Image: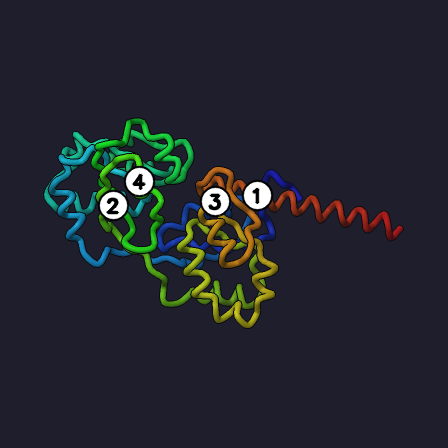
Amino acid sequence: MNYNLSPLAGKTILVTRSVGQSNQFSDRLTSAGAKVIEMPTLEIGPPSSWEALDQAILHLSTFNWLILTSSNGVEYFFQRLAKSGQNQDALSGVKIAVVGEKTAQSLQKQNIQADFIPPDFVADSLVENFPELLRGKKILFPRVESGGREVLVKELTAKGAEVIEVPAYESCCPQNMPTAAEYALVNNTIDIITFASSKTVLFFSQLTAPIFTYNPEILARVSIASIGPQTSKTCHSIFGRVDIEAEEYTLEGLTNAIIKYVIKESRTAEAQRSQRDVFNH
């Protein structure tokens, strides 16, 4: 096998990103030789009400910081900002912190550079490395309506900040899975399943319960790949294990971790074959 050109050749990988967000990741895996099957386990849409976000946008000048932790948060926030009749000038006195490379890229598409990006692509790192004293700071945090982590708000509040959380979007479980994904799972042709958030793990579990309840051995032979510690924690609670975890908590980091794992697996298998050959002779 040529590890450099197509390290994932012969591998079938199930990608569980949300609709419209999986293309770049799938392309990376395909470029490395994998066959990719997409199974969106998240649908993104508007929150149940815009009122809280719209009110916050009306009073933007009262905030010291705007914190954005996802591309969805960026997109929906700026959609509502435009709808309110305002533009980026409304943010001139507000500093912006983002968590994650993709979030920073989404912000750049708005022609805005973040004032602060924590060194690790996780929310906890944002509080640990925050560039200012948080006491007395008023922070706007547009976020997913339900199921998001509470730790960031707790830690910011504990350091004396006033955090205004507003729902900017909602993520929910799709009604069904694509036929190709269901067929591949039932017929045992998936080698690796990737997860980029805790919600994708939970919704995947819901969608596949009819398959795995009666055929637990299918899941047992599939490798589970996680983008980072928080997602891994959810994988452990639902599947009891994680086989691959990204060192850098990005989709590129996850791709690299999968390649490293597959190469190591291939070399181990080759070494075992060689030993068997020697033994048989």
Earlier residue among tags 3 and 4? 4
Q: Earlier in the sequence, mark 3 or mark 1?
A: 3
- Label 4 amino acid? Ser
- Work out whether residue 135 or residue 247 is closer to the camera in this orientation and state it: 135
Point out the frontmost of discs 3 and 4. 3
Q: Position of residue 256 (x, y in %)?
A: 53, 40
> SS class of the residue under badge 3?
helix
Coordinates of residue 180 in the picture (x, y in percent): 48, 64
Q: Residue at x 45, y 49 (%)?
A: 231
Q: Residue 28's spot in the image, x, y percent?
A: 48, 44
Query: How many C-alpha atoms fall within 10 Å of the one at disc 4: few (<14), some, or many (≥20)?
Result: some
What whole-number distance in Å separates the C-alpha atoms at marks 3 and 1? Answer: 19 Å
Find disc 1 in the rendering and name its residue.
Answer: 259
Cβ atoms at labels 1 and 2 below 8 Å apart: no
Element under disc 4: helix
Q: Specify the amino acid type for callout 2.
A: Pro
153 w.r.t. 128: above or below: below
Disc sitting over residue 106 in the figure: 4
Q: Is residue 254 left or right of residue 3?
A: left
222 is higher (above) or lower (below) than 275:
below
Front residue of this view, candidates 274 and 156: 156
Quote the CA–CA distance across marks 3 and 4. Answer: 23 Å
